[in-house]
Image: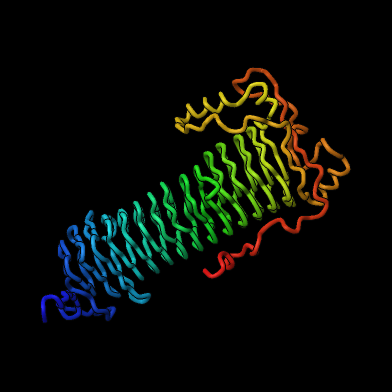
Amino acid sequence: MSRTGFREVILFTLVSLVPLTVHPALGQEVLSDQIALPESITGELVLTGQHLLEKNVTVAKGGVLILEAGARLKAAPDVSLTIQGTLRVDGSEAKPVEIYSAEGTTWKGITMLTGAQGVIHNGRILRAEKGISVLAARLEVSRTTITGSQTGIHLVREAMADIKGVSFTGNKVGLAAEMRSAGEISGCLFKDNNVGLGIASGATPAVKGNRFVGNSLGLQVLQRYPGKIEGNIFEGNKAGVRLYQNGPDTIVERNRFVNNSDAAVLALSYTSPVIRNNYMTGGKYGIYANQFSSPLIVDNVIREMEQAVHLNKKNISQLKGNVLADSGVGIFCDFSSYPLIRDNLFSGNRMHLKLGKFQSSNWESRAGSKSYVLETATRQGSRNPRLGQGPKEFPEAVDATGNWWDEKTLQEMTEKGKDADISTLYDGHDLPEVTYEGFGEETYRLDKILYLPALKTESETAGLKGWEGTADERVPGL
């Protein structure tokens, strides 16, 4: 055979190379020895059976490392596997490939460098500092479990990744995507992590049809994200989704949020995403928008919350076509927030609409909140250059006309007329005057709520579009 046609394949088959013994009690074959990988792999190396990663190993450019079904690679503490060429993990459901360190130890993980390629099917990666780090490389992972790691997968920069059906459990961070990394994350399970999935610094992976269960924070998106968070289930997390400084090209759509204790969606610090066609139930807040954030909130069903929607600090959100039902408060407004509230359905809430103590245009016109905002920001160490900006005109009422109120509330409104104390609305009729710490003994008028004219018939268009909010109808075709 000519050297041109020569293809070097090193096949470690431990059944033939390593003596086996039989455990007398269990009747199982037990390996009596293990083989260490070379420090540099330049040809094609195929592994079956059990092996050791005793030192840092590099798969060079042009090199290929293949782990076949049932292969196990045990890593010594603090060692790493670096891929400059190609990594293939060809496990099966019955015989997954395992890469792990001993109990109580941590290995560095797999690092894929510029131009590398990785394809991992049916693998298990355990107890790594970073299970897989990807820098300007391509990665495909499916039907794989990553557990007990600081970070399961880290798309460091300019990575192209297709992550499907991967289980991230018990990690500090399940998956992190940063610096223009792209691709798709779908059909994955993020369970019992501190943070399930984090996206930042211009990364744009699509997030579709995943389950986030029992995490401290299911999904976090920092800064601009021109993409969709679509068709996912968020259940039993402290917070489902946290958005920070996102624009209107961030879309949260057709997701199911169940019993996320703190909030289904947090929108913080000048965030203005689109939140539409989601089902939310159980927990303290459905949507919590704070720090000058003004999301577009459309066609959602939010029920059985302490507060369905919480709007704070100069919020000018638009709320249209939502069903806000069976909660302690339907919409809460505070600190000079004047949202547009139209075509919504309010039903069964203890308070449909409630204004907080700082909801006072009278205070804004006489004293103003700018100095208070800047003082608070300085005390908290904020460096946000946009602090102090926001609405400069403040009406004397929150306009909630053009909505449908449940029968009892609508009857009370009709009988009492405009500008009355309505039992399911909390405003300046309930607390006419307020005082503020740091503003002397001056009293200020609390705003009122405008509620008439109202929709005369129950809106048939409010609520979900194209689905009923159940777990099996998240994204058609997924």
Q: How many marks?
A: 0
State the residue at coordinates (59%, 51%): 275
Q: Residue furthest right?
A: 415
Q: Is residue 417 above or below residue 276?
A: above
Left/right placement of residue 437 relative to residue 387 reads right
State the residue at coordinates (38%, 61%): 161
Q: x, y percentage for residue 248?
A: 55, 47
The part of the image, by quadrant, that contains residue 86 is bottom left
The part of the image, by quadrant, that contains residue 257 is bottom right
Left/right placement of residue 392 relative to residue 67 reads right
Q: Residue furthest left?
A: 2
Left/right placement of residue 44 relative to residue 205 reads left
- Quarter of the image where the N terminus is located: bottom left
Q: Is residue 471 visible?
A: yes
Please state which of residues 243 and 56 is positioned toward the viewer in this rendering.
Answer: 243
State the residue at coordinates (20%, 79%): 15
Q: x, y percentage for residue 213?
A: 49, 58
Q: How is the image coloured?
A: rainbow
Please state which of residues 377 and 252 is positioned toward the viewer in this rendering.
Answer: 252
Please state which of residues 29 and 360 is positioned toward the viewer in this rendering.
Answer: 360
Left/right placement of residue 180 relative to residue 355 reads left
Q: x, y percentage for residue 234?
A: 53, 57
Q: Is residue 348 visible?
A: no
Q: Is residue 291 above or below residue 307?
A: above
Q: Is residue 375 above or below residue 309?
A: above
State the residue at coordinates (51%, 47%): 242
Q: x, y percentage for residue 342?
A: 72, 47
